[in-house]
Amino acid sequence: MSNTVASSVASERWVETTVGELAEYITSGSRDWSKYYADSGAIFIRTQDINRNRLSLNEVAFVKLPEKVEGKRSLVRKGDLLVTITGANVGKVAVVEGEIPEAYVSQSVCLVRLRDPSLAKFVHLQLTAKRGDKTTVEAMAYGLGRPVLNLENIRSAPIRLAPHKAQVLIVAEIEKQFSRLDEAVVNLNRVKANLKRYKAAVLKAAVEGALVPIKNRQTTKICEVADLVTKGSSPNWQGFTYADSGVVFVRSQNVGWGNLDLSDVAHLPSAFNEKERKSVLRIGDVLLNIVGASIGRTAVVTPEIEGGNVNQAVAVIRLNKERMLPKYLMLNLLSPGTQTAIHTEKVDVARANVSLSDIKDFSVLFPSLAEQGTMVAEVERRMSVIEELEATVEANLTRADRLRQSILQRAFRGELHIENKSHV
C-alpha cells in the first residue's frame, strides 16, 4: 500500500555540515595545461562544458600531457562534483554521474571529490537550489567584471545532510519530478522552434509576393529606391566621449530583429551631430547592423531616437517614401533570403562586416505602395499572433524553472511529499 513518507523524512535528524567536511579533497586544474591542447587525447573540462548545472561533453577540448605533468588530483572520475570558479558562468555545479574517459579540469573549474561518492547527487542537487535569485555558491562569487570563487569558498559552502535512507528517497523523488518538467520543457522548446520557423515562413511568403495578391512583380535594387545609404562613425575617432545626456547614440546592440532595444542607449554631445551630419537620424530611416555578431538585425527609426546618430556598425537607409515603405524594406531585410545574402556577402577579417555597396545592390520585390502597405499589415497581424504565443511559451518556461527551484527548496527543508510503496 502506498504511503506518504514526507513526515518521516522531515522528522529524521539532519546534520549541518559543509562541502569541505564531506570532501576527500578540493582542487582545480593547473594554469599551464592549456599549452597542451591537442586534436585528441584526454578531455580538458572548461567552464563552458558545464551548462545548466550539467556536464556537457559535446564540443570538448583535448590535452596531451607529458609524463612530467602531475595530474592525478585533477583527474575526473564518477561521483566528482565540478564547480565553475571564474567568468560569467561562475558558480555552476555538475556531478559526474557515469563513467567518463580520461579527463582533467582546467584552472577555471574546481573538482570536489567526496569521501563518500554516494552523497554526490544529494549534494549536487542541494548546491543547485537557489536562495532568492542565486544558489549558495553563486552568492559567494566576488569581483567586478569577471567574478571568481576560490577553493575556500567551495569548502565553506553549507550542506544540510539527511540520513542515508532519506537521501535516497529525496533524490529519487526530485529526479522523478524533474523528469516530468524536462519533458514539458522539451515540448515547449519544440513549440518555440516551430514558431520561429513559422515567422521565417511568413516573411518569406511576404517578400516573394505569396502572402497577399500583388499585380506588379518586378524587382528593384535598394539604391534605386533610397535617397541615402550611409553608416555612422566611432565617437572615439572623432574625439568624443559618452555623456549623461545629449544626442541619442544608437549602437548595434540597440538594433533588434524588427524592433529597437533602447534599454541601454548611449548619448553624445550635440557637437557630434554637427560633425556627422550624414548619419543624423530621421523617423522612418531603416537601420541595419553591418558589423559583428549581430550582423543582419534591422529596425525602423521611431520618434524616440529622431535626431540621434549611429556608430560605424550600423547602416542608415533613407528611402524615397513615395516609392517604398520603410517597414516593407525592413521585412525584406529580415526575410530568410536576404539574411542568407547578407551572411554570404559578409567579409570575415577581424570582424564580419557587410559593405554599403553590397546593401545598395540587394534586390527586393517592388509592388505598388498600396500593395506594400497591405503586405506590411498582414505580416504584422500574423506576427502579433506569433508573439503572443511566444510570450506564453516563455512564461511557461520561466514557470518550469521556478517549479524546479520550488521542488529543490522544499526537498532540502524536509517538506517534499514522497510517495513510496515500501516503509522507510
Image (cartoon, rainbow, N blue to C red):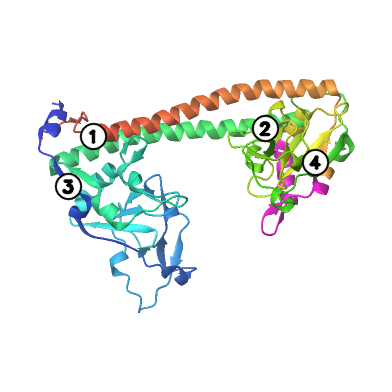
Q: Nearer the viewer, residue 263 or 259?
A: 263
- Depth check, mark 2 against mark 3: the one in front is 3
Residues packed near mark 2 inside 10 Å, few (<14), some (14 to 19) or many (20 plus): some
Secondary element type, mark 3? strand
Task: Give residue 236's position: percent from left, percent from top.
Answer: 69, 51
What segment is highlighted magenta in the picture? 332-359
Residue type, label 1 = Ala
Residue placed under numbered mark 1 in the picture: 411
Identify the mark at residue 17; answer none if there is no mark: 3
Q: Amino acid at mark 3?
A: Thr
Picture residue at 43% right of the left edge, 30% below the top: 398
Dot 2 amino acid type: Gly
State the residue in front, 259 or 113: 259
- Decide which of tag 2 and tag 3 comes sooner along the chain: 3
Q: Is residue 282 left or right of residue 57?
A: right
Residue under circle 4?
Answer: 274
Tell me the residue that label 2 is attached to.
Answer: 258
Q: Earlier in the sequence, mark 2 or mark 4?
A: 2
The rendered magenta stretch, by its main secondary structure, is classed as: helix
Q: Which type of secondary structure does the marked residue at label 2 adopt? A: loop
Q: Earlier in the sequence, mark 2 or mark 1?
A: 2
Lower position in the chain sequence, tag 1 or tag 3: 3
